[in-house]
Image (cartoon, rainbow, N blue to C red):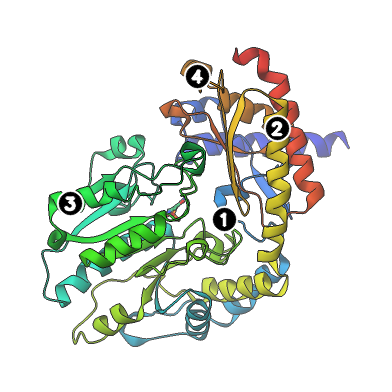
Amino acid sequence: MTDQFSLKQTIYQELVEWDKKYFLHPTTVPKTHVEQGPKLIFSEGNGIYVTDIRGESYIDGISMLWNVNLGHGQKELAEAAKEQMSKLAFSSSFVSYSNEPAIRLAEKLVSLSPGDLNAVFYTSGGSESNDTAFKLARFYWQLKGKPEKTKIIALERSYHGVTIAAQTATNVPAFHEFSGSQISGVFHAKPHLTHCELGERSDPNYEGCIRYIVEKEGADTIAAVILEPVQGSGGVYIPPEGYLQAVCKLCDEYNILFIADEVICGFGRTGTMFGVEHWGVVPDLMTFAKGVTSGYAQLGGVLIKQSIRDTLVEYDDVLAHGFTYSGHSTACAVGLKNIEILEREQIVQNVKNMEQELKKGLKYLEDKHTIVAKSRVIGLLAGFELFADRDSETPFDPTVKAAVKVVEECFNRKLILRALRANEGHNIIAISPPLTINKDEIETMIQIIDDSIAACKQDLM
Ligand code: PMP
């Protein structure tokens, strides 16, 4: 027994040392990491729970990176990958080669997506998808005889990824400071106000900030506007009714393509299959990743409107864009199975039901703790904020790092959540659990948050 235990300890220590030494972690503070080592070394998961190599289980309150939509330990997805990979390791999608899962998934995605989004270009993730959307938009305008339409308008607070074009559209200062490298011609418009900020006012006319840039730069220089239907990493901001419709109308008016980044919102997260469905708009290009496979395989893509697809397929030379893993057969087989389960288990309906429970839970936290405010929930995508004085919206002293502290307390109580934009002085906490979550599990999460706030309230003041 003791020998077994010490062997496990030795293996664990070795992994920690190797991790510190050899594994440069993304979006991590390197100095802290090499001093303290990995926070957890995940080894397995089941439903909303993940277990670390030392055997401790945690509730995954954020679906890891907003992506494990069907939860952990979904054996059917593992089986689908195994079956496909056993048959065919890999096949190219270049120069007209194809494979069955990629074809079937394309047909399925088209049937699920709104309006006449009728073709798909595959990538391996969200950043690649957004870069692809920008390139497709520019190429489309070239084919239309308008090569000067190249500029992209994104929103402040947006997150679109880290490849250089996607990162330029991302509006998180740390990501820009990291390399300094940006593509030219990308602009950021002030975003819409949110439900919370609008209060009783109903005027959603904040697409005017986009209009201002369009008119200043000239519509004939703008290729596309990109936005997340619900802004995720930027703070979970739900647009007011009418905003997306107004942006869509503006794009039509000025002949600009409208790109919806559904990387977080897609595949049920907000209580509809895609986020845009809440507002009844159909983008020209719609990017997706994460939830398409619930994170079980690396896959993303761009859904393309019929008219754009028709223009692209008229091109009689090589479409000079593509990734080795565009249309990876295993990833696509997992995507197909993931959608099959989403539909069979009526997961979107569960999201709608659980949205009510999460709303109740956040209301309870607001009623109980005077530092909690501005909670927002759409489907199972939620956030709330902490204020020193919520009535006057007085923020906490940034050095207090209030949200980070509460998230740490939750972690100590075995719930993983995430503080958003903490290094910009915000105190927003995101909740985004697997879509398979049930009422009891939501109540457990809320109880842990309740206890964690109570435990560290004194420290925050
Ligand atoms: N778009 C959005 C809205 C995202 O949230 C993310 C990732 N969090 C991305 C794009 C980038 O995706 P990836 O990390 O797969 O490149």
User: For mark 2, what is the residue?
Assistant: 365
Looking at the rendered image, the disc whose residue lies closer to the viewer, 1 or 2, is: 2
x, y percent for residue 87? 58, 82
Q: Measure the alpha-carbon separation of dots 1 and 3.
A: 30 Å
Q: Is residue 436 visible?
A: no
Q: CA distance from mark 1 to mark 4?
A: 33 Å
Mark 2 to mark 3: distance in Å? 43 Å
Which residue does the numbered mark 1 point to in the structure image?
A: 67
Question: Residue flagged by tag 2: what amino acid is it?
Answer: Leu
Distance between the alpha carbons at the discs numbered 4 and 2: 18 Å
Q: Can you say whether 33 is above or below 211 in the image? A: above
Q: Residue 185 has which mark?
A: 3
Judged from the image, the secondary structure of the residue bearing numbered disc 1 is: loop
Q: Position of residue 337 (x, y in %)?
A: 63, 74
Question: In the image, which disc is placed on residue 394?
Answer: 4
Kind of residue at disc 3: Gly
Q: In the picture provided, is 309 more to the left or to the right than 345? A: left
Are the two marked residues, 1 and 4, in contact with CB atoms closer than 8 angstroms?
no
The residue carrying mark 4 has its beta carbon less than 8 Å from ligand 1: no
| Circle nearer the N terminus (4, 2) | 2
Q: Residue at x 16, y 77 (%)?
A: 143
Q: Is residue 228 left or right of residue 67?
A: left
Q: Residue at x 72, y 43 (%)?
A: 360
Which marked residue is nearer to the observer: mark 1 or mark 4? 4
